[in-house]
Image (cartoon, helix red, strand yellow):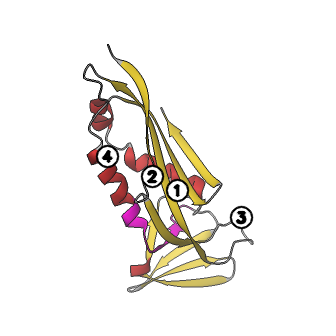
Amino acid sequence: MARITEIEIQKEENCFSAGHFTIFSSKDREDLHGHNYYVGVSMKVLVTENGLAFDYRDFKKHLKSLCKQLNLKFILPKYSKFLKLEETPDMWLAHFDNEKIPFLKRDVIILPIENATIEDLSNWLLNELTKDQDLLDKFQIKEMTVKVYNGPGQSAATTKG
């Protein structure tokens, strides 16, 4: 008989170290700094007649590859209304208020987010993990939550169901 269960994946290797700054307004932002981020995923799934939801080894590899993309990068938001990004042949220039902040291209990842916060990072990771509707249907994933921690006791979670 089929039933719904919740699977949680919270492994030490689901982590990344990255730089960022949070933008609070058109005139106020944090200084450049970084965190060691940790990512946890929980899924409500259908358990089949053999007592198994699905073989989630491939899912864990995908999550680990997303963390690897972010590791040792400086995260810049593509859609901030307060930050303008300018590309040069070898650099990204981030324009904020009257500041021009240069970054080597190899050190940066530009994400389709509004702000480099754990709120937006959890949403981006969730969207990346749920892009393939066929895969979600195949694994019968009914709901997924991605939680991003930027330190002990501080996290943000985004759910899609």
Reading the image, the residue beneath label 4 is 59
Reading the image, the residue beneath label 2 is 125
| Of the image marks 4 and 1, the number of the one nearer the N terminus | 4
Q: Which SS class for mark 2?
A: helix
Q: CA distance from mark 4 to mark 2?
A: 13 Å
Q: Which SS class for mark 1?
A: helix
Reading the image, the residue beneath label 1 is 121
Q: Is residue 157 above or below residue 99?
A: above
Q: Tell me the magenta residue range.
A: 67-79
- Of tags 4 and 1, the one toward the viewer is 4
Q: Disc 2 vs disc 1: Cβ atoms closer than 8 Å? A: yes
| Of the image marks 2 and 3, the number of the one nearer the N terminus | 3
Q: Disc 1 vs disc 3: Cβ atoms closer than 8 Å? A: no
Q: Give the class, few, some or many, for how many residues have Cα within 10 Å of label 1's Cα (few <14, many ≥20).
A: many
Q: CA distance from mark 2 to mark 3?
A: 22 Å
What percent of the width, then of the height, locates residue 83? 60, 70
Q: Residue placed at 61% from the left, 76% from the top?
A: 33
| Of the image marks 1 and 3, the number of the one nearer the N terminus | 3
In the image, residue 77 lies in the stretch drawn in magenta: yes
The quadrant holding residue 108 is bottom left
Q: Give the class, few, some or many, for how many residues have Cα within 10 Å of label 3's Cα (few <14, many ≥20).
A: few
What percent of the width, then of the height, locates residue 106? 39, 80
Reading the image, the residue beneath label 3 is 24
| Of the image marks 3 and 4, the number of the one nearer the N terminus | 3
Three-letter code, disc 4? Phe
Q: Which SS class for mark 3?
A: loop
Three-letter code, disc 3? Phe
- Of tags 2 and 3, the one toward the viewer is 2
